[in-house]
Image (tube, rainbow, N blue to C red):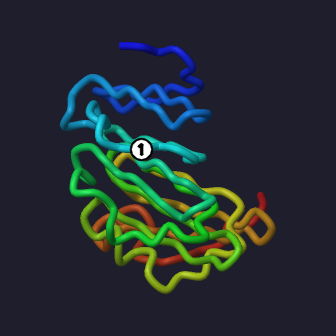
Amino acid sequence: MDFTGMTDVYSTDQAFMALSKTTGKAQCWGNSACGGSCSNMDFSGFTDVVSSYIDFVALNKNTGEGHCWGAWVGNGCSQVDFAGVTDVYAAKHSGFMALNKDTGKAQCWGSTGLQAACDGKDLSRVTDVYGTYYGLFMALDKNTGQFWCLAGSSYRSKICGGRDSFFFESV
């Protein structure tokens, strides 16, 4: 492999990606089922790459284009509209959230039930996002202490008491 000019390296649990943000050239290796194969993708102009345990997502903020590859999102991310997305977050195992902080629109995909968890939520005040192992996201507004629980219904009931959002009060 030729790593000349590579500027960034990313990893899943079983694969690596070396990327030149200057040229858009990438090298992926490791378990191809977990993101170790990206030879047919052009990363020219891509600004962000995030990875979970078994998947990668690359975002071009300038064009609103995204690439997804790996085990759970191996069929791509054609259902995701990356136009206007400002941030992409990865849960540790298998889930992603694309967020437009200007409009508050979030799109979630990957883990079972995660897609519906983001539908219709206004997350424009979100300051931080945290992902768990099983594809649950907690979105926080530090200014008000409000948390949004973004998960499939089974995880939402186990971890968030079945609530979509709640507030933390200072101690």
Residue shown at 59%/74% (left/top)? 166
Q: Nearer the viewer, residue 148 or 84?
A: 84
Residue 61 position by quadrant:
bottom right
Quadrant placement of the N terminus: top left
Q: Residue at x 29, y 59 (%)?
A: 111
Residue name at image x 61 percent, y 70 percent: 84
Residue 149 in the image: state x and y as whole percent.
49, 68
Of residues 54 and 134, the one nearer the viewer is 54
Which residue lies under the disc numbered 1? 42
The foreground one among 2 and 153 is 2
Q: At label 1, which amino acid type do we have?
A: Asp
Tell me which residue sits at (21%, 32%) in the image: 32
Q: The residue tagged with tag 1: helix, strand or loop?
A: loop
In front here: 92 or 1? Answer: 1
In the picture, which quadrant includes the C terminus? Answer: bottom right
| Residue 89 image position (x, y, % from top left) | 51, 53
